Amino acid sequence: MTWIAELLYSNMEFSTLASKLFILQMCFIFPPALGITNKNIPLVVITWDYLQASQKAWQTIYHEKRSSLDTIEESCSLCESLQCRTTVGFGGSPDERGETTLDAVIMDGITMDVGGVGLLRNVKNAMSVARKVLENTGHSLLAGELAGEFAVQMGFKNESLETNSSQEMWQKWKNNNCQPNFWKNVVPDPSKSCGPYAPKSRKNYSEKKTNLPVWNEQNHDTIGVLAIDLKGHIAAGTSTNGAKYKIPGRVGDSPIAGAGAYADQDVGAAAGTGAGDIMMRFLPSFLAVEEMRRGATPKEAATTAVRRIAKHYPEFAGAVIAIDKNGTFGAACNGLPDGFPHYVVNLELGEPTLFRETCIKPCKIGGDCF
Ligand code: ASP
């Protein structure tokens, strides 16, 4: 480090302002030049046990020295094409009509630009389309049929997202009187029969539990990726095919900035996975980033976000991952009996390493939640 100090303070011809700035810039971009290595960076944190996506992320961010946005796109796209656990990409989570639709978001922590697609139909590359929204439009979220048209205009292929297995899954559900489903306060009784449904008169509404799909580790698995690249650039993203047997038209939490994912270069980033219809009511990714801004560690911030939801919905199943700008990471979950697996990789770990977070203790409705 002394040679740098000497150069900066010497009166030699070399020490022009431009040269000094250049040296400082190089030290910022390549901290090892100063003998400073932050072993936490580059960093990638990925929800669930998506090993191949995590390996792809590390390959992109570390070996290929590419950006955090590229890393998010590469790892999510791989999961989409591998149909990770059939909860990401085509051929999974059919809606009530048997169609698979996709949700994805990507957020740049420096520019605060966001690209999201919700309810994307007939195009497999949800994350890449989301990145096109970020880079080629002034919008933050496109949805539905017309998001598909945008994707085709951007060069993506129009093709069916159904597979034999998604059609079988859907057929089984139909044969089982359309159970479970997301309806309530309608006739005929949605816990017994298929639709079409009509609303009950309001005086007959009941709080009685409906036959909502059960969310657990096996059936809900959005890929959420948080990344800090070699230049320190922070970004976040998600990709999913959403909820099984959703009502056609449903958009989940994943493509919504602040709900599915959020990134802010001054602080860090966060992403959520789980019962999206509930989670999006609390903007858990935004909340986690704001908690870190107030000084919380990533784990404390994720825990606050999860507790906020669990206070009102003690049985919700879901998790939040968070990182701060220094490369510290953490996670929290609720309602997952076996805990929440997630992959982390940084310079220190050297390869994707699986962590499993134990969930918070159950909360009482509206009561204390510790
Ligand atoms: N959050 C996603 C959704 O509700 C699903 C998941 O994470 O499994 O669409």
Image (spheres, rainbow, N blue to C red):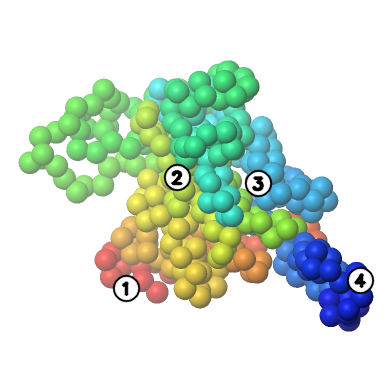
Residue placed most toward the observer, 254 or 92: 254
Q: Which residue is mark 4?
A: 13
Q: CA distance from mark 3 to mark 4?
A: 40 Å
Q: Is tag 1's residue or tag 3's residue first in the polypeptide sequence?
A: 3
Which labelled disc corresponds to residue 256? Answer: 2
Distance of mark 4 from mark 2, alpha carbons? 54 Å
Discs 4, 2 touching: Cβ within 8 Å:
no
Name the residue: 72% across, 67% down. Answer: 40
Quarter of the figure with residue 287: bottom left
| Type of amino acid at the residue the image marks with label 2 | Ile
Which label is found at residue 368?
1
Which of disc 2 and disc 4 is earlier in sequence? 4
Along the line of sight, the residue nearer the viewer: 153 or 85? 153
The quarter of the picture where the N terminus appears is: bottom right
Q: Position of residue 263 (x, y in %)?
A: 54, 56
Q: CA distance from mark 1 to mark 3?
A: 39 Å
Tags 1 and 3 in contact by the CB under 8 Å rule? no
Residue 349: give x, y in percent of width and height: 77, 64
